[in-house]
Every structure is written in C-alpha cells, then in structure tokens.
Amino acid sequence: MSLTQFSGGRASTVHTSLPKVTMPALAEMKRQGKPISALTAYDYASARIVDEAGIDLVLVGDSLAMVVLGYETTLPVTVDEMLHHTRAVRRGVSRALVVADMPFGSYHASVHEAVANAARFLKEGGAEAVKIEGPRTELVRALTGAEIPVVGHLGLTPQSVHRMGGYRVQARTADAVRRLRADARALAQAGAGALVLEGISREAAEAITAELEIPTIGIGAGPGCDGQILVFHDLIGLTFAPAAKFVRRYADASALIRSAVEHYREDVEHRTFPSDAESYHLPGAARRSLQMEFDEGEIDEYGAMVNQDALEEWEEFTHS
Ligand code: KIV
C-alpha cells in the first residue's frame, strides 16, 4: 500500500480559467489567429501536469512505443496498449482536447475494421478524436460519418519508416510539395478536423496552412503552422538519444531524476533514510503498556516522542 496520493486540488489557475477545448474550438482558434499548443502525454501524472499548464491538445501518441515502451519504432504498439494509456491520460485531463493515435495496423486492413477500432478509442479510452497517418481520405470520410473526429497526419509519418527508409524530412522537391498540398486539401475536404504536419520544410507548411480552413499543427515543420506539438519526453529531456533539430528542450529531466535516485540510494546505503521524523510512532498508551515488556534502553530511545501527534498519526495510518 502506498500512502502517497495523486488526487487533490488542481494546481494551476490557467487550467481552471479557460473553457474546455473541443474540435470546433480548434477551428475557431485558427479563425481568430490564436496559436494552438499541443503536447503528447501517456500517463495520468504527465497528462495532468500538461493539462494544468494550459496546453490545448493532448495527444496520446504512438510515440509511446519508443519513449515509454523502449521499442525502436512506433510499429509494435497495439490497440489495447494504446487504449490502456489513453484511459490513464483521460483521467488526468479535464480541459484539453484528448486525441488518441491509432497504431500501425489498426486502420490499414479495411475501413470497417478501422472504424470499429477508432470507436474503441472514444468508447473505452475517452478520447475525443483519433489521429491517423497518411492521405486516407476514404477512411477520414467513414470516420467522420461515424461521428469520430479525425486529426490527419502528413509529411514524415513515422509508421511509414520502412517505406521512407528512415526518419527523413519529406517533400523536398516542388512536385512532392504539390502532392503534399493536394493530400492536405483532400483530407480537409474529407472531414479531418485538424492536420499534423511533421518533418517538412517551413515553406511547404506555410503554404498548406494558408490554404486550409482547418488548423495545422506542426512538428519539425517551422513556425508558420497554426499550432505546434512536441513529444513530452523530448520537451523535458527524458530521452536517451540526441534530439532532432526541431526539438527544444525546456528541462533536463533525465539529470534531475538520476540525481534524485542516486541521492536516495546513498541515503539508504548510509542509513540516513528514513529519519525518525519520517517514521511512525506508537501512541503513548501502547508504548507505556509495552514498556513493561521492552528493555529499558529501547524505550528510552523513544520516550520523548510520545504525544498527541503520534497518536493521531498512528490512527490515520491504521485507518488508511
Ligand atoms: O506519436 C506522436 O507522438 C505523434 C506526434 C509527434 C505528432 O504522432
């Protein structure tokens, strides 16, 4: 049993003072020229922090396969694993729009199966939209027809790593940019509510952003998109490989966590953790009763600490 509790008051004023973000609200933000902040999250604690910090869109990205589960690509993660994390994120978020990534293989075999899998993210995961990679207009139409809001994803689509021959910047020729623009328009016409643009030139991203009514959310696509998204672990520096050019690290969580864990280990090894103040004490009556049975030396050690606080602390512990 852990006595540590996650629940409690919400920390941020940003969070409580802003209205719930919905899919139509994202389009409205674009119309009003308000930048959309987006970030991935994969568990309750990080999702709650991200939400309380006022981020507009939380993506349960399939990048969790790499940054949380330690796989080399995003391909192995399953629908059930994504659902498990989506539910945890859902519990931590109250304001941001929660979008779940559909994992590789879950929307590729047939439109029928894709709609059924996508519905699980709303029904069982509590997501408010799903994200799919690639120019799949027929699928976007079917999903929106089934009342499942869709975020598209074009450019560097990590689930296509083997086709692309690695994680490379995409649409590097004029023709490729024309195709990308056509794909973006087609996804918007098919009903996508927003579009992630990853790993493309800022020029291409700006052109697409200018001609779409739906918001674009960039990652490695320059500053001209309607919003930006990063992987949570990249932003806080909790990764083990050199960061990509587009990543801005706002913290060094690896160093922070490593140092905390090393200090804890040292304290255990030197027997300086836990201290007496971090220990529970018997209430006075029990202590006095046991005094008859203990050696005097043992009792003296604790004698000075028998007080009302100790009694309340003990009762709290035994009732928890
Ligand atoms: O899985 C993911 O984290 C993503 C974002 C990087 C857009 O798809």
Image (cartoon, rainbow, N blue to C red):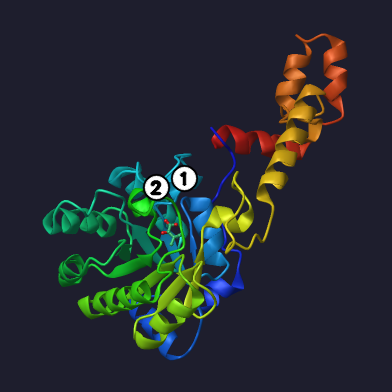
The foreground one among 69 and 12 is 69
Label 1: how many residues lie within 10 Å, few (<14), some (14-19) or many (20+)? some
- The reply to whether callout 1 and callout 2 are in contact (CB within 8 Å) is yes
Where in the figure is residue 36, as x and y percent of width and height? 48, 77
User: Sequence-wise, which precedes: disc 1 or disc 2?
Assistant: 1
- Look at label 1 and name its amino acid: Met
Please say if 192 is above or below 28. above
Residue 187, placed above or below residue 319 = below
- Crowding near pointer 2: few (<14 within 10 Å), some, many (20+)? many
Residue at the image position 78 percent from the left and 22 percent from the top:
269
What whole-number distance in Å separates the C-alpha atoms at marks 1 and 2?
Answer: 6 Å
Determine whether, in the image, residue 239 is placed left or right of residue 289: left
Q: Is residue 182 above or below residue 159?
A: below
Identify residue for label 2: 74
- Examine the rendered structure and indicate whether residue 87 appears above or below residue 197: above
Q: Which residue is mark 1?
A: 66
Q: Quadrant of ligand 1?
A: bottom left
Q: Quadrant of the C terminus?
A: top right
- SS at mark 2 in the image: loop
Would residue 37 be seen by someone viewing this image from the given angle?
A: no
Place of residue 184 in the rendered image (x, y in percent of width and height, measured from the top left): 31, 76
Q: Is residue 294 left or right of residue 139?
A: right
- Whether disc 1's CB lies below 8 Å from ligand 1 is answered no
- Disc number placed over residue 14 in the picture, else none: none
Please state the horizontal and vertical placement of residue 119, each as a whole percent of the image: 21, 58
- Looking at this view, name the residue that lies furthest to the bottom: 32
Kind of residue indicated by mark 2: Thr
Name the one closer to the observer, 127 or 249: 249
Residue at 31% over, 54% down: 125
Does the numbered disc 2 mark a residue whose Cβ is under 8 Å from ligand 1?
yes
Secondary structure, mark 1, is helix
